[in-house]
């Protein structure tokens, strides 16, 4: 995800010389330096953070405490430094606690999703109360380098709801497309043809939904002719509680996000 953000920022016009990253693994760092020669890479977090206006913490949740604790002096050196975390499950309260300070810290917590790797992401953001409007605009612009949909939530707990919809959402659609492909094969199509039809159908339906002024329910009704084939399929889905299945999935992901927040906070 860090590479996707860096690449997106450079593609949107940010000078590579102002894009710095820290990578502890030599092989990975060599890859980054070869692919992005204009950017500034280092194995030293301190070197990268020094003088930065914005610091993006794109690390695994399990190591975030160590990173923030060891770098807290530098992160707090400039009171206007904006910290953006994309570490899943770590609350801003825990991040603030790990910096060992009573001073306000400018933190934006972000939940992107994997399509961000292709510049087609969706992201939810939450800012601590001392983050300025200008800093929020900066954070939003950074995420728009990889995400087509960026929204702010006023309650940090809603980040878990974002996780349930968009953070984990791509996997739901992969599963649905997998099931559609399998059904197509069972109906006599080749796996290749079933996959091609499934992917284009999902893409086409998405584009219709994005460009139409109708809401999703209206779009569904418009393509569902009475007593036709689509109605038969929709009736089958409704009889099998498709709405409850999706609601349970979204809530399961959101609830697991809350559990992870508690677990990670307690462990560290």
Image (cartoon, rainbow, N blue to C red):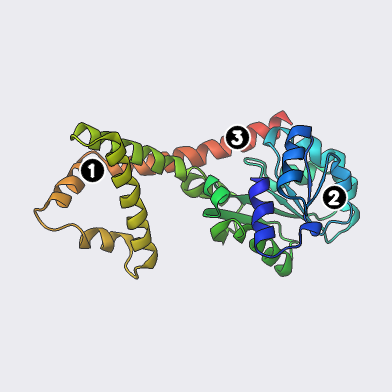
Residue 25 makes an appearance in the image: no
Observer-nearest residue: 94 or 42? 42
Instruction: Kindly identify the residue that appears in the image at 26 percent across and 41 percent down.
Output: 241
Tell me the element at label 3: helix
Image coordinates of residue 206 in percent, x first then y, are: 37, 57
Residue at label 2? 49
Say which quadrant the N terminus sits in: top right
Residue at label 3? 260
Q: How far apart are marks 3 and 2 (CA)?
A: 28 Å
Q: Are marks 1 and 2 in contact (CB under 8 Å)?
A: no
Tell me the element at label 1: helix
Mark 3 burial class by Cα count in 10 Å: few <14, some 14-19, many 20+: some
Residue at label 1? 237
Instruction: Kindly identify the residue that appears in the image at 13 percent across and 49 percent down.
Output: 229
Image coordinates of residue 90 in percent, x first then y, are: 67, 41
Q: Is residue 75 left or right of residue 161?
A: right
Image coordinates of residue 186 in percent, x first then y, are: 21, 32
């Amino acid at each position: 995800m860090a590479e996707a953000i860096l690449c997106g920022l450079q593609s949107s016009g940010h000078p590579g010389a102002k894009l710095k990253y820290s990578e502890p693994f030599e092989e990975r760092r060599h890859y980054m330096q070869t692919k992005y020669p204009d950017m500034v890479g280092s194995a030293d977090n301190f070197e990268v953070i020094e003088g930065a206006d914005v610091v993006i913490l794109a690390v695994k949740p399990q190591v975030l405490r160590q990173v923030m604790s060891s770098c807290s002096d530098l992160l707090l050196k400039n009171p206007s430094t904006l910290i953006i975390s994309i570490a899943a499950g770590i609350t801003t309260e825990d991040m603030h606690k790990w910096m060992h300070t009573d001073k306000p810290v400018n933190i934006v917590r972000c939940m992107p999703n994997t399509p961000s790797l292709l510049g087609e992401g969706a992201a939810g953001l939450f800012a601590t109360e001392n983050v300025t409007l200008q800093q929020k605009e900066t954070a939003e612009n950074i995420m728009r380098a990889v995400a087509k949909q960026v929204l702010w939530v006023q309650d940090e707990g809603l980040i878990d709801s974002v996780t349930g919809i968009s953070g984990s959402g791509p996997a739901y659609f992969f599963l649905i497309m997998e099931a559609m492909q399998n059904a197509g094969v069972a109906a006599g199509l080749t796996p290749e043809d079933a996959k091609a039809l499934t992917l284009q159908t999902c893409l086409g339906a998405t584009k219709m939904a994005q460009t139409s002024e109708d809401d999703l329910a209206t779009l569904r009704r418009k393509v569902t002719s009475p007593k036709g084939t689509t109605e038969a399929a929709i009736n089958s889905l409704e009889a099998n509680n498709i709405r409850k299945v999706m609601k349970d999935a979204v809530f399961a992901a959101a609830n697991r996000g809350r559990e992870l927040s508690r677990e990670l906070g307690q462990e560290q």
